[in-house]
Image (tube, rainbow, N blue to C red):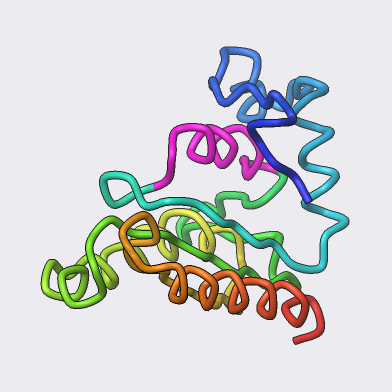
């Protein structure tokens, strides 16, 4: 498990992080996180949807860690090749609107497209499960307990899938 807030992860993409494009040495904090990704069988991301995207700290994690040379490469004339093909991903998102409102806005499909095309599939991962937890801050205690149980069961069984 890697809680980006308690680990004091620095999400700011720095000039030295860009050495990945010129074959230079990546910073040690990046290499450390990349090693965790390489060793993992599965990646689970649990976060609130903010403006149809990731919270800043997670966006920064993707920018710095799922980087060129570690998670993908460019193939001239063909596009990209992802290096994380053997992994799977579980994305658990909390939303502000309820399910009906989220669907009416087209947000569910937009989030999947943003995540799939711009992050996860780019790195070669095609086995992706999504879970949307609607309005957790505005639901009753019983529904909140149901959400927690669902997430617990998903976590227990995810790496065995």
Q: In which quarter of the image is residue 83?
A: bottom right
The residue that appears at 53% across and 65% down in the rendered structure is 91
Q: Is residue 41 left or right of residue 135?
A: right
- Report the front residue among 43 and 1: 1
Q: Position of residue 134 (x, y in %)?
A: 34, 68
Q: Which of 25 and 33 is in front in this view?
A: 33
Residue 85 location, quadrant? bottom right
Quadrant of the rendered image containing residue 64 = top right
On screen, residue 80 above or below 86: above
Q: In this view, does 75 lie to the left or right of 108?
A: right
Q: Where is residue 65 in the image (x, y as percent from the top left)?
A: 66, 38
Looking at the image, which residue is at 56% across and 42% down? 62
User: Is residue 59 shown in magenta?
Assistant: yes
Mark yes or no: residue 113 visible: no
Viewer-proximal residue, 106 or 121?
106
Above or below residue 79? Residue 159 is below
Q: For the point 75% across and 87% down, which residue is it?
A: 161
Residue at the image point whose x is 78% and y is 51% from the top: 1
Total marks in image: 0
The residue most toward the left is 104
Q: Give the range drawn in magenta.
A: 54-69
**Residue 81 screen position, x and y as percent:** 60, 61
In the figure, 101 relative to 93: above or below?
Answer: below
**In the rendered view, does 136 fall on the left or right side of 3?**
left
Q: Which residue lies furthest to the bottom in this view?
A: 161
| Residue situated furthest top in the rendering | 15
Is residue 138 visible in the rendered image? The answer is yes
Query: Magenta includes 36?
Result: no
Location of residue 20 in the rendering, given as x and y in whole percent from the top left corner? 66, 29
Secondary structure that dominates the magenta span: helix
């Amino acid at each position: 498990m890697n809680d980006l807030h308690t680990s004091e992860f620095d999400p700011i993409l720095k000039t030295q992080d860009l050495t990945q494009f010129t074959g230079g040495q990546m910073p040690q904090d990046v290499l450390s996180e990349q090693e965790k990704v390489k060793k993992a069988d599965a990646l689970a991301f649990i976060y609130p949807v903010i403006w149809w995207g990731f919270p800043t700290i997670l966006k920064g994690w993707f920018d710095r860690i799922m980087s060129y040379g570690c998670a993908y490469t460019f193939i001239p004339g063909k596009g990209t090749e992802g290096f994380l093909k053997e992994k799977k991903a579980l994305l658990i998102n909390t939303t502000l609107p309820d399910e009906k409102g989220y669907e009416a806005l087209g947000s569910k499909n937009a989030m999947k497209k943003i995540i799939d095309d711009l992050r996860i599939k780019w790195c070669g991962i095609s086995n992706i499960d999504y879970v949307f937890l609607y309005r957790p801050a505005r639901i009753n205690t019983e529904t909140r307990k149901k959400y927690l149980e669902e997430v617990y069961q998903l976590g227990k069984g995810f790496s065995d899938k």
